[in-house]
Image (spheres, rainbow, N blue to C red):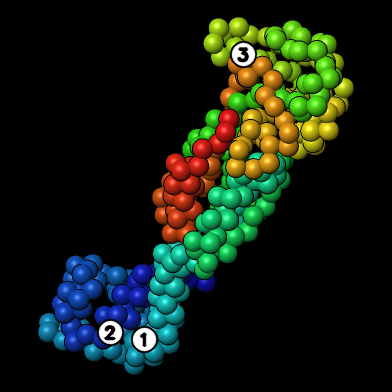
Amino acid sequence: MKHHSLDDLQLFVFASKYRNLTEASEYLDVPLATLSRRIKRLEEQLGCRLINRSAHHFSLTSDGERYQKLCEPLVQGLNNVTERIAQDRKALSGKIKISAPINMTQVWLKYCIYEFAEKHPDICIDLDVQNEKIDLISKQVDITFRIGDLIEMNWVARKLWHLPFALCASTSYLEQHPPITHPSDLVKHRLITVNNDSDWELINQRSGEVFSYHGPFNFSSNDVLLARDAATKGLGITWIPPYYFNNHDQDNHNLEPVLPNWQGHEREVYIMYRDRDKRPMRVDAFINHVYEWKSKFHLAL
Protein backbone atom coordinates (compact mmCIF):
# COMPACT_ATOMS: atom_id res chain seq x y z
CA MET A 1 0.00 0.00 0.00
CA LYS A 2 1.40 3.36 -1.05
CA HIS A 3 1.49 6.21 1.44
CA HIS A 4 0.80 9.70 0.17
CA SER A 5 1.90 12.90 1.83
CA LEU A 6 -0.99 14.81 3.38
CA ASP A 7 0.93 18.03 2.73
CA ASP A 8 1.19 17.19 -1.00
CA LEU A 9 -2.48 16.27 -1.10
CA GLN A 10 -3.43 19.52 0.62
CA LEU A 11 -1.30 21.59 -1.77
CA PHE A 12 -2.93 19.91 -4.77
CA VAL A 13 -6.47 20.54 -3.48
CA PHE A 14 -5.73 24.21 -2.76
CA ALA A 15 -3.81 24.74 -6.01
CA SER A 16 -6.65 23.27 -8.08
CA LYS A 17 -8.75 26.33 -7.23
CA TYR A 18 -6.46 28.74 -9.07
CA ARG A 19 -5.94 29.41 -12.79
CA ASN A 20 -2.22 28.62 -12.91
CA LEU A 21 0.55 27.35 -10.68
CA THR A 22 2.17 30.79 -10.42
CA GLU A 23 -1.01 32.29 -8.98
CA ALA A 24 -1.44 29.27 -6.70
CA SER A 25 2.14 29.54 -5.39
CA GLU A 26 1.59 33.22 -4.55
CA TYR A 27 -1.64 32.61 -2.65
CA LEU A 28 -0.26 29.55 -0.86
CA ASP A 29 3.09 31.27 -0.16
CA VAL A 30 4.94 28.26 -1.55
CA PRO A 31 7.76 28.63 -4.10
CA LEU A 32 6.60 27.75 -7.61
CA ALA A 33 9.31 25.12 -8.08
CA THR A 34 8.36 23.48 -4.77
CA LEU A 35 4.65 23.45 -5.62
CA SER A 36 5.30 21.98 -9.06
CA ARG A 37 7.67 19.33 -7.68
CA ARG A 38 5.28 18.21 -4.94
CA ILE A 39 2.30 17.90 -7.30
CA LYS A 40 4.49 15.91 -9.68
CA ARG A 41 5.51 13.66 -6.79
CA LEU A 42 1.83 13.09 -5.94
CA GLU A 43 1.14 12.18 -9.58
CA GLU A 44 3.99 9.67 -9.54
CA GLN A 45 2.66 8.08 -6.36
CA LEU A 46 -0.85 7.84 -7.83
CA GLY A 47 0.40 6.69 -11.24
CA CYS A 48 -1.72 9.19 -13.17
CA ARG A 49 -1.63 12.79 -14.39
CA LEU A 50 -3.67 15.21 -12.28
CA ILE A 51 -3.21 18.47 -14.18
CA ASN A 52 -2.52 19.58 -17.74
CA ARG A 53 0.25 22.20 -17.56
CA SER A 54 1.04 25.05 -19.93
CA ALA A 55 3.09 28.23 -19.59
CA HIS A 56 0.16 30.39 -18.47
CA HIS A 57 -2.62 28.01 -17.60
CA PHE A 58 -3.37 24.61 -16.18
CA SER A 59 -6.48 22.49 -16.03
CA LEU A 60 -7.41 19.38 -14.15
CA THR A 61 -7.47 16.10 -16.02
CA SER A 62 -10.47 13.83 -15.55
CA ASP A 63 -8.45 11.89 -12.96
CA GLY A 64 -7.48 15.19 -11.35
CA GLU A 65 -11.09 16.37 -11.15
CA ARG A 66 -12.20 13.08 -9.58
CA TYR A 67 -9.29 13.05 -7.14
CA GLN A 68 -9.92 16.68 -6.18
CA LYS A 69 -13.62 16.07 -5.49
CA LEU A 70 -12.88 13.00 -3.38
CA CYS A 71 -10.07 14.61 -1.39
CA GLU A 72 -11.40 18.11 -0.80
CA PRO A 73 -13.87 17.02 1.98
CA LEU A 74 -11.04 15.09 3.66
CA VAL A 75 -8.71 18.09 3.55
CA GLN A 76 -11.44 20.41 4.78
CA GLY A 77 -12.31 18.01 7.60
CA LEU A 78 -8.66 17.80 8.64
CA ASN A 79 -8.42 21.59 8.67
CA ASN A 80 -11.58 21.80 10.77
CA VAL A 81 -10.20 19.31 13.30
CA THR A 82 -6.90 21.20 13.49
CA GLU A 83 -8.75 24.48 13.98
CA ARG A 84 -11.00 23.01 16.69
CA ILE A 85 -8.02 21.61 18.59
CA ALA A 86 -6.27 24.99 18.35
CA GLN A 87 -9.40 26.77 19.62
CA ASP A 88 -9.80 24.26 22.45
CA ARG A 89 -6.23 24.85 23.61
CA LYS A 90 -6.77 28.60 23.59
CA ALA A 91 -10.12 28.51 25.37
CA LEU A 92 -10.62 28.87 29.11
CA SER A 93 -12.83 25.80 29.11
CA GLY A 94 -12.44 22.04 29.11
CA LYS A 95 -11.05 19.81 31.87
CA ILE A 96 -7.98 20.03 34.11
CA LYS A 97 -6.87 16.87 35.94
CA ILE A 98 -5.09 17.80 39.20
CA SER A 99 -3.28 15.42 41.53
CA ALA A 100 -2.32 16.48 45.08
CA PRO A 101 -1.55 15.04 48.54
CA ILE A 102 -4.66 14.31 50.60
CA ASN A 103 -4.06 16.19 53.84
CA MET A 104 -2.36 19.23 52.33
CA THR A 105 -5.32 19.59 49.98
CA GLN A 106 -7.94 19.11 52.71
CA VAL A 107 -6.32 21.62 55.06
CA TRP A 108 -5.45 24.54 52.77
CA LEU A 109 -4.69 23.82 49.08
CA LYS A 110 -8.38 23.23 48.42
CA TYR A 111 -9.06 26.93 48.93
CA CYS A 112 -6.70 27.80 46.09
CA ILE A 113 -8.44 25.30 43.81
CA TYR A 114 -11.94 26.44 44.86
CA GLU A 115 -11.05 30.05 44.06
CA PHE A 116 -9.85 29.06 40.60
CA ALA A 117 -13.05 27.09 39.96
CA GLU A 118 -15.14 30.11 40.96
CA LYS A 119 -13.11 32.37 38.69
CA HIS A 120 -13.37 30.01 35.67
CA PRO A 121 -16.77 28.27 35.75
CA ASP A 122 -16.31 26.85 32.22
CA ILE A 123 -13.26 24.86 33.28
CA CYS A 124 -14.03 21.47 34.82
CA ILE A 125 -11.78 20.42 37.72
CA ASP A 126 -10.99 16.73 38.21
CA LEU A 127 -9.17 16.63 41.58
CA ASP A 128 -7.47 13.36 42.52
CA VAL A 129 -6.08 13.36 46.07
CA GLN A 130 -3.70 10.63 47.22
CA ASN A 131 -0.43 10.33 49.12
CA GLU A 132 1.14 7.65 46.94
CA LYS A 133 3.19 8.42 43.87
CA ILE A 134 1.02 7.60 40.86
CA ASP A 135 1.63 7.19 37.13
CA LEU A 136 0.81 10.71 35.96
CA ILE A 137 0.73 9.76 32.28
CA SER A 138 -1.72 6.86 32.53
CA LYS A 139 -3.92 8.95 34.85
CA GLN A 140 -3.82 11.80 32.30
CA VAL A 141 -2.79 14.32 34.96
CA ASP A 142 -2.24 17.93 33.84
CA ILE A 143 -0.99 19.41 37.13
CA THR A 144 0.39 17.71 40.23
CA PHE A 145 1.61 18.93 43.61
CA ARG A 146 4.40 16.99 45.28
CA ILE A 147 6.15 17.28 48.64
CA GLY A 148 9.84 16.52 49.15
CA ASP A 149 11.82 14.56 46.58
CA LEU A 150 8.91 12.92 44.77
CA ILE A 151 9.91 14.63 41.52
CA GLU A 152 8.78 13.12 38.22
CA MET A 153 11.36 12.72 35.47
CA ASN A 154 10.66 14.74 32.30
CA TRP A 155 8.16 16.98 34.11
CA VAL A 156 8.67 20.65 34.90
CA ALA A 157 8.96 21.07 38.69
CA ARG A 158 8.74 24.54 40.26
CA LYS A 159 9.08 25.22 43.97
CA LEU A 160 6.06 26.79 45.64
CA TRP A 161 6.39 26.62 49.42
CA HIS A 162 8.84 25.62 52.14
CA LEU A 163 7.23 23.50 54.85
CA PRO A 164 9.06 23.04 58.17
CA PHE A 165 8.04 20.66 60.95
CA ALA A 166 7.43 21.77 64.54
CA LEU A 167 6.20 20.46 67.90
CA CYS A 168 2.74 21.11 69.29
CA ALA A 169 0.44 19.81 72.04
CA SER A 170 -2.98 20.59 73.46
CA THR A 171 -3.36 23.19 76.19
CA SER A 172 -4.76 20.56 78.54
CA TYR A 173 -1.79 18.24 78.01
CA LEU A 174 0.75 21.00 78.67
CA GLU A 175 -1.07 22.05 81.84
CA GLN A 176 -0.98 18.51 83.25
CA HIS A 177 2.62 17.57 82.42
CA PRO A 178 6.08 18.88 83.31
CA PRO A 179 7.29 21.94 81.40
CA ILE A 180 9.51 21.31 78.38
CA THR A 181 12.42 23.73 77.91
CA HIS A 182 14.72 21.69 75.66
CA PRO A 183 14.20 18.79 73.22
CA SER A 184 16.02 16.52 75.67
CA ASP A 185 12.90 16.83 77.87
CA LEU A 186 10.92 14.87 75.23
CA VAL A 187 11.85 11.61 76.95
CA LYS A 188 9.63 12.68 79.88
CA HIS A 189 6.55 13.09 77.68
CA ARG A 190 4.07 11.08 75.68
CA LEU A 191 4.87 11.50 71.99
CA ILE A 192 2.81 11.13 68.82
CA THR A 193 4.34 10.64 65.38
CA VAL A 194 3.45 10.07 61.76
CA ASN A 195 4.93 6.76 60.67
CA ASN A 196 7.22 8.13 57.98
CA ASP A 197 8.49 10.88 60.34
CA SER A 198 9.72 8.70 63.19
CA ASP A 199 13.18 10.32 63.19
CA TRP A 200 12.81 13.83 64.53
CA GLU A 201 15.67 16.23 63.90
CA LEU A 202 15.11 19.54 65.65
CA ILE A 203 17.20 22.61 64.87
CA ASN A 204 17.36 25.67 67.11
CA GLN A 205 16.59 28.59 64.81
CA ARG A 206 18.74 30.94 66.92
CA SER A 207 21.79 28.94 67.98
CA GLY A 208 21.84 26.30 65.24
CA GLU A 209 22.00 23.48 67.81
CA VAL A 210 20.71 20.17 66.43
CA PHE A 211 18.89 17.55 68.50
CA SER A 212 17.74 14.17 67.18
CA TYR A 213 15.01 11.99 68.66
CA HIS A 214 14.33 8.45 67.42
CA GLY A 215 11.63 7.21 69.79
CA PRO A 216 9.95 5.53 71.52
CA PHE A 217 6.49 6.86 70.67
CA ASN A 218 3.19 6.36 72.45
CA PHE A 219 0.98 6.81 69.41
CA SER A 220 1.68 6.62 65.68
CA SER A 221 -0.39 6.81 62.52
CA ASN A 222 0.20 6.96 58.79
CA ASP A 223 -2.12 9.98 58.62
CA VAL A 224 -0.99 13.41 59.84
CA LEU A 225 -4.55 14.53 60.60
CA LEU A 226 -5.01 11.58 62.94
CA ALA A 227 -1.73 12.49 64.65
CA ARG A 228 -3.04 16.03 65.04
CA ASP A 229 -6.38 14.80 66.39
CA ALA A 230 -4.58 12.57 68.88
CA ALA A 231 -2.67 15.61 70.12
CA THR A 232 -5.92 17.57 70.30
CA LYS A 233 -7.31 14.84 72.57
CA GLY A 234 -4.37 15.36 74.92
CA LEU A 235 -2.56 12.13 74.09
CA GLY A 236 0.83 13.82 73.82
CA ILE A 237 3.18 16.06 71.84
CA THR A 238 3.34 15.65 68.07
CA TRP A 239 5.68 16.71 65.26
CA ILE A 240 3.81 18.09 62.22
CA PRO A 241 3.91 21.06 59.82
CA PRO A 242 2.78 24.20 61.70
CA TYR A 243 0.02 24.99 59.20
CA TYR A 244 -1.90 22.06 60.69
CA PHE A 245 -2.18 23.84 64.05
CA ASN A 246 -1.04 27.45 63.65
CA ASN A 247 -3.31 28.83 60.92
CA HIS A 248 -5.33 31.61 62.52
CA ASP A 249 -7.78 31.68 59.63
CA GLN A 250 -9.06 28.27 60.77
CA ASP A 251 -9.71 26.40 64.00
CA ASN A 252 -6.40 25.84 65.77
CA HIS A 253 -7.79 22.73 67.50
CA ASN A 254 -6.60 24.09 70.90
CA LEU A 255 -3.04 23.17 70.00
CA GLU A 256 -0.10 25.27 71.11
CA PRO A 257 3.46 25.39 69.76
CA VAL A 258 6.01 23.57 71.89
CA LEU A 259 9.61 24.85 71.79
CA PRO A 260 8.77 27.30 68.98
CA ASN A 261 12.46 28.12 68.44
CA TRP A 262 13.08 24.51 67.40
CA GLN A 263 11.99 23.36 63.94
CA GLY A 264 12.86 20.64 61.46
CA HIS A 265 14.36 20.82 57.99
CA GLU A 266 12.02 22.43 55.51
CA ARG A 267 10.41 20.31 52.85
CA GLU A 268 9.70 21.72 49.43
CA VAL A 269 6.25 21.77 47.87
CA TYR A 270 6.42 21.63 44.07
CA ILE A 271 3.91 22.29 41.33
CA MET A 272 4.60 20.04 38.36
CA TYR A 273 3.35 19.94 34.78
CA ARG A 274 4.39 18.07 31.66
CA ASP A 275 5.40 20.66 29.05
CA ARG A 276 7.54 23.80 29.15
CA ASP A 277 5.49 25.31 26.33
CA LYS A 278 2.52 24.54 24.10
CA ARG A 279 0.29 24.00 27.13
CA PRO A 280 -3.48 24.55 26.87
CA MET A 281 -4.47 28.01 28.03
CA ARG A 282 -6.58 26.56 30.85
CA VAL A 283 -3.48 24.85 32.28
CA ASP A 284 -1.47 28.09 32.06
CA ALA A 285 -4.35 29.93 33.71
CA PHE A 286 -4.29 27.51 36.65
CA ILE A 287 -0.50 27.75 37.06
CA ASN A 288 -0.69 31.54 37.06
CA HIS A 289 -3.57 31.44 39.54
CA VAL A 290 -1.56 29.30 41.97
CA TYR A 291 1.28 31.82 41.98
CA GLU A 292 -1.12 34.75 42.36
CA TRP A 293 -2.84 32.96 45.24
CA LYS A 294 0.52 32.20 46.81
CA SER A 295 1.49 35.89 46.72
CA LYS A 296 -1.58 36.95 48.71
CA PHE A 297 -1.98 33.93 50.98
CA HIS A 298 0.56 33.42 53.74
CA LEU A 299 0.81 30.00 55.35
CA ALA A 300 1.27 30.25 59.08
CA LEU A 301 4.44 28.15 59.20
Q: Residue furthest front?
A: 175
Is there CB contact under 8 Å for labels 1 and 2? yes
Three-letter amino acid code of the residue under disc 3: Ile
Residue at the disc numbered 2: 16
Q: Quadrant of residue 162?
A: top right
Mark 2 and mark 3 lie on one chain; the one further toward the N terminus is 2
Name the residue beneath numbered marker 3.
Answer: 203
Q: Is residue 119 visible?
A: yes
Q: Answer yes or no: do the residues labelled 1 and 3 have beta carbons within 8 Å?
A: no
Q: Which of marks 1 and 3 is in front?
A: 3
Query: In which quadrant of the rendered image does the C terminus lie?
Result: top right
Residue 206 in the image: above or below residue 237:
above
Q: Which residue is drawn at 34% across and 72% down?
A: 8
Report, in whole angstroms, how far the alpha carbon at label 2 lies from the one at label 3: 77 Å
Disc 3 crowd rating (10 Å Cα; few below 14, some 14-19, many 20+) is some
Numbered mark located on residue 68 in the image: 1
> At 45% from the left edge and 55% from the top edge, which residue is drawn?
285
- The total of numbered circles placed on residues is 3
96 on left or right of 131: left
